[in-house]
Amino acid sequence: MVLKYTIPKRVEEVIALEKDEHIYYAVPYDIAKDASFLSDSYLVVTNLRILVICKGIVEETYDIKDCSGAKAVPRVGGGLLTITHKGIDRILVHYSAKHLSRYAYIARGIHILASGRSEEVESKEYEKTCPVCGRAIPGTRTCPKCSGEGGFFKAFLRMGAPYKKDFFGIFILMILAAVTTLLNPEIQKRLINDVLKENGGMRKALVFLLLMFSLSVGIVVVNILKSNASARLGARISADLRSKLFRKYQELPISFINDRRPGELLNRITQDTMFIRQFMEDVFCNLFAVLFIFIWDVIFMMALNLKLALITFAFIPIAVALTVLFRKTVSRIFRLQMRKNDDVASDLQDVLSGMRVVKSYGKEKEESERFKTLSYEFAKINCRNETFWAFFSPLLQLIMGFGVLAVVYFGGLDVLTDKMSAGELFQFVTYTQLLFQYIQWLNRLPLQLAQLGACLERVNDILTQDVPQQDEEKVKDVAINGEITFDHATFGYKSYQPVLEDLSVTIHPGEMVGIVGASGAGKSTLINLLMGLYEVDDGRLLIDGIDAADIRKKCYHSQIGVVLQETFLFSGTILDNIRFSKPDATYEEIIRAAKMANAHDFICNTPNGYNTYVGEKGYSLSGGERQRIAIARAILTDPRLLILDEATASLDTESEYMIQKALNRLTHGKTTFAIAHRLSTLKNADRIMVIDKRRVAEIGTHEELMEKKGIYYNLQMAQTS
């Protein structure tokens, strides 16, 4: 069963299931009729009844056979479920916003049960929930929180898993750098004690100086190798992540892309991956070396002089406490900084894409001021971040300075009383400076880890998204004949707000169907389903009697052609834009498609013919020219299913005439769906489908619909008058 919650035993006893009765849905509702919040209250739907149970008492019961429909009506902050029982609309339950999607599915399920198609309910999984926490999820086995996918270290390990050998090589170089750094103070101590204090002679001094020089050169060489290896690894990781993100964007459903701002998606590919590269180059290349030096530095200091070591360590908890105290602040301000960066990038992209509109209305100054405001807000957050670190870092340096001063004072007393040699004091001070230097480096680590964590979180938010996968054993390649059937199909961009509901219609092969209706009726949604951009929420879309979900997507898309009102051309040549639908097309095939689209003549008159470069979105061409290139692109694949969305809208008479001739060639013998607000262009359609109130309200030829004097007749009369 689906959407079945754990029902208290006393509620199951209250239900008292009849023979052959079983539960389909059992979900809580949480708002009472007086608008107060409820608990321990359930709506239960079986194959025979609908029961409303409030705090263990069955308040209402309705027989499924007496119901003719159900609706989930969204409201501010929640919604309500209504049913039509014996012809009367009744409100069943109220619920909060967290149950909106859930009750939308239940409403459809009740509608199907009332229609006597119970087998469809049992086979359809209306919603997936996490088995750990019960949270609704978009198809994954467990939600990211319960699966632990969002953890920083797991995310970092997943990112670095393919580069184990590179990480190991850098790790070895970091250990070498740490060892050479720690050896220097020991040699300096010997130089002071054995040469300067004991007057060991020039020969001995030269030996120590040569050792110190060799170690210094070794440190430089190792650091160069380490930095180069880290830079190469960072560049590889960044490039691979960019490729993975871009590929993921192509795989994700169009609904996901539409729900995100372009600037945000762009920043995840550019800014976030760039910071990951910088982290590898500037931070990771020193991370283990610093930790190794830090640990051995502490050990050497304790072995050299325990009293001075304890005096030094007394200052460390203060630095650590300050770092921990401000850790959440650091994480918060950098996430805020990234969000503001997304706002700036999104606004910039919107303005550049809509520059023609901005200039048309003379809004350059207003848009500049708006962008200036966003930029200043971003700069203000940056200033706050830098001000925080400008105060925080010197404060830590002051604490560390007091630590070095304390070591010099108390160590100097030990030297004067012969408890410690001058060389040992110099060595200890050097270790102390190294310790405090790396504490300061480690102090900035939370900032860099916070930035890295935010970037990894944003990157993984994309990479861990569920991609709808077809069952390879079930899907098949099909040569489309052209019969299209909507079988009780329901769809909404938000699951609780259906745009098309219980749609049932069959289109025959080779038939041209005009689609008309008021603005917002669902015409474009219908063709979005036909283009395979979305899948129906309930019911089925059948292609030649086969469920569209069972046809391999690549095979299906290779057999459809699309000409939209807003023609999109990519930056590139005319040849590239026509060839986009069929990359392996020959030059002869492209010319033939262009001639059929009445585009060949004007292409030949351009400066470089088919190799003429068109700018972004093809704005260097006229609207009619862009449309004819789009038609050539559709013709090139010789599609069996053709979709025209206002293909001749907003064009001059000559362009419309040329395009109409091209469309007549293109639509011959193909199943065609054509949307048009100008109804006169659909008079020759085999049938005209009128969409109204989320359903097919009328369907028939132009003459039949005019005789009916319904919605289509009124639309025709309104345009004529």
Image (tube, rainbow, N blue to C red):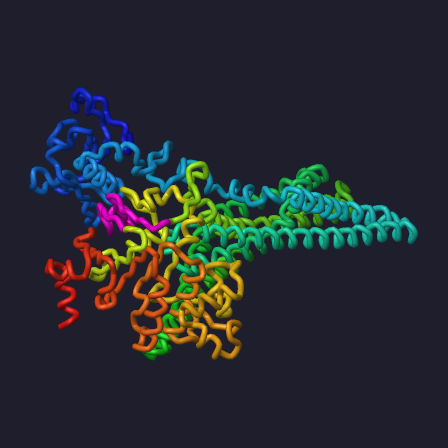
Q: Residue at x 20, y 60 (%)?
A: 517
Q: Residue at x 23, y 37 (%)?
A: 109
Q: Residue at x 68, y 38 (%)?
A: 299
Q: Nearer the viewer, residue 450 or 315?
A: 450
Q: Give left or right: position of 486 versus 378.
A: left
Q: Is residue 485 magenta?
A: yes
- Look at the image and give the residue range highlighted in magenta: 481-507
Quarter location, residue 525:
bottom left
Image quadrant for the C terminus?
bottom left
Q: Give left or right: position of 611 versus 565.
A: right
The spot of residue 617 in percent (x, y) is 43, 69
Q: Nearer the viewer, residue 64 or 390?
A: 64
The spot of residue 620 in percent (x, y) is 44, 76
The spot of residue 180 in percent (x, y) is 75, 47
**Residue pushed farthest front?**
669
Mark yes or no: residue 528 visible.
Answer: yes
Give above or below for 230 relative to 613. above
Q: Residue at x 18, y 40 (%)?
A: 31
Mark yes or no: residue 415 visible.
Answer: no
The spot of residue 44 in percent (x, y) is 19, 31
Give above or below for 348 relative to 542. below
Image quadrant for the N terminus?
top left
Q: Is residue 538 magenta?
A: no
Q: Nearer the viewer, residue 394 or 651?
A: 651
Q: Give left or right: position of 586 versus 338.
A: right
Q: Nearer the viewer, residue 359 or 112?
A: 112
